[in-house]
Image: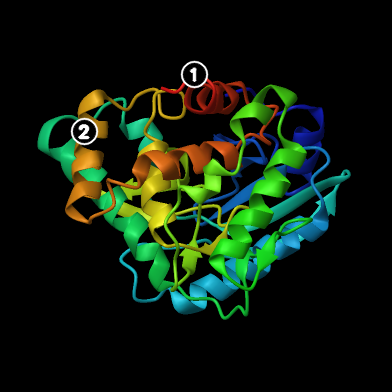
Amino acid sequence: MLAPDHEENVILRRFGLSQARLIGEGGEARVFALDENRVLRIARPGASMDSLRQRQGLAAEIAKSAHHLPFATPHIETVEEVEGRAVAVERRLAGVPLAHLFETIEGRQREAVLTSYLDASAAIQTIIPDRPYVGELGGGHPVRADSYQQYLGKKLEAIRAEAPETFFAALGPDIVDALPDCDAPALVHFDMFAGNVLIADGRVSAVLDFGETTLIADPALESWSVVAYLDPQISPNARPADRALAMAWLERRGLAAAYPAARRFIAAAWTHAHDDPAVMAWCRSILIEGR
């Protein structure tokens, strides 16, 4: 992880910190430890305050419905603009990112943690925001429809509009036609990769970053996506044995047969991530190279 840049240092000083420990980063933001109980999320340049406020509202809504879950969800205390950057103060959640633990844990402990991760993906669907549509909950131009099949068709149009030209031939109607229908859509995080999941005491302690990818869709999409995100380009420290365990987990739930089609749709949905080389390599491997 890179040290804070000039703007980030100015923002950190505004919050009374001459220096701060960077504890996480992704395509949308970098996260610094503010104190024992809070973190400071500094959005990447160009991120809008509206997006951050949407995230704050969604986090509050999800928290109201998530008390039954064995893991925590985000709580955003404040949002503001500092030095032209969108900044949020959030409650600090306990645990270590699963992506980091993949480097060290072994044996039965590894299997237990991975199973907890997979089980958490199935639990997300029990958080039910009240929405009269299927599709994205936020974002600048959310794709929404009255039914899941209608959503898939509109989503494919949006994917093709944003994807690099090299993907066009791979983004035909079969991307969505091959997916099963769903008559009971539910909440799907859709960005629940190992970096957005915290582990404490051998199990999932928190799921982070509900945001622009979060939607109402087939709840199985969550489970298919977390298995897909164990691919080497997304989770380089995950092992073939981890992927085998995940596939067996899908098999036990009757979700394995549709996984190849779902994985292609998931990769198609991420072709907009032009500035993330790892994600682009992953999309190419699935959609163009057929791996």
The residue at 73%/49% (across/down) is: 15
Disc sitting over residue 289 in the figure: 1
**Which structural element holds mark 2?**
helix
Q: Is residue 232 left or right of residue 7?
A: left
Between 232 and 75, the one lying in front of the other is 232
Disc sitting over residue 244 in the figure: 2
First reached walking from the N terminus: tag 1 or tag 2:
2
Instruction: Please indicate, yes or no, whether residue 193 appears anywhere in the rendered image.
Output: no
The residue at 87%/43% (across/down) is: 83
The residue at 53%/28% (across/down) is: 287
Kindly report which numbered mark, 1 or 2, lies closer to the viewer in this rendering: 1
Measuring from the top left, give residue 203's x and y in whole percent.
25, 51
Disc 1 residue crowd, few under 14, some 14–19, many 20+, Cα 10 Å: few
Single out the residue that lies furthest toward the left: 108
Between 130 and 271, the one lying in front of the other is 271
**Which structural element holds mark 1?**
loop
**Number of numbered discs visible in the structure rendering:** 2
Q: Is residue 220 left or right of residue 265?
A: left
The answer to whether residue 236 is above or below residue 272 is above
Measuring from the top left, give residue 256's x and y in whole percent.
27, 46
Q: Is residue 179 left or right of residue 245?
A: right
Image quadrant assignment for residue 242:
top left
- Type of amino acid at the residue the image marks with label 1: Glu
Give me the C-alpha separation between circle 1 and circle 2. Answer: 21 Å
Disc sitting over residue 120 in the figure: none
Measuring from the top left, give residue 1's x and y in whole percent.
57, 24
Image quadrant assignment for residue 47:
top right
Instruction: Please indicate, yes or no, whether residue 269 appears anywhere in the rendered image.
Output: yes
Between 72 and 221, the one lying in front of the other is 221
